[in-house]
Image (tube, helix red, strand yellow):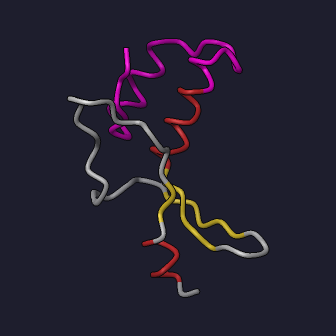
Amino acid sequence: MSHERILKNRANLNNLKEPGQDAWCENCDERLIFSLRDDHHEFSLGMRTILECLKFAEEQGEIPKIPRKWWNKISVRHGIISRE
């Protein structure tokens, strides 16, 4: 798969958007994108998706609470949605 097709094959966190909420611009540039591959797939994963997964893990109690100050800095830098 070409580099361009990998970048367009973006993985996103499902069910992030609740009714009545705005989601981030899916077509906006991200500061950091990871190109991933397994035995059968090649795709890209944006930093925002990773951060949303981290926030979900925190909310589920799977990781310790991350300081609010850190989340505030990250949300400004990477444009993630605050769910609090």
Residue 47 in the image: x percent, y percent?
50, 48
Towards the viewer: 32 or 57: 57
Residue at 20% from the left image edge and 29% from the top image edge: 20
Above or below 56: residue 67: above
* Left or right of residue 14, residue 80 in this image: left
* Left or right of residue 62, residue 28 in this image: left
Towards the viewer: 37 or 69: 37
Residue 19 in the image: x percent, y percent?
26, 30
Per the image, is 79 magenta? yes
Q: Quadrant of residue 72?
A: top left
Residue 82 in the image: x percent, y percent?
35, 24
Residue at 58% from the left image edge and 86% from the top image edge: 1
* Left or right of residue 21, residue 17 in this image: right
Towards the viewer: 26 or 68: 26
Q: Residue furthest front?
A: 19
Residue at 53% from the left image edge and 26% from the top image edge: 55
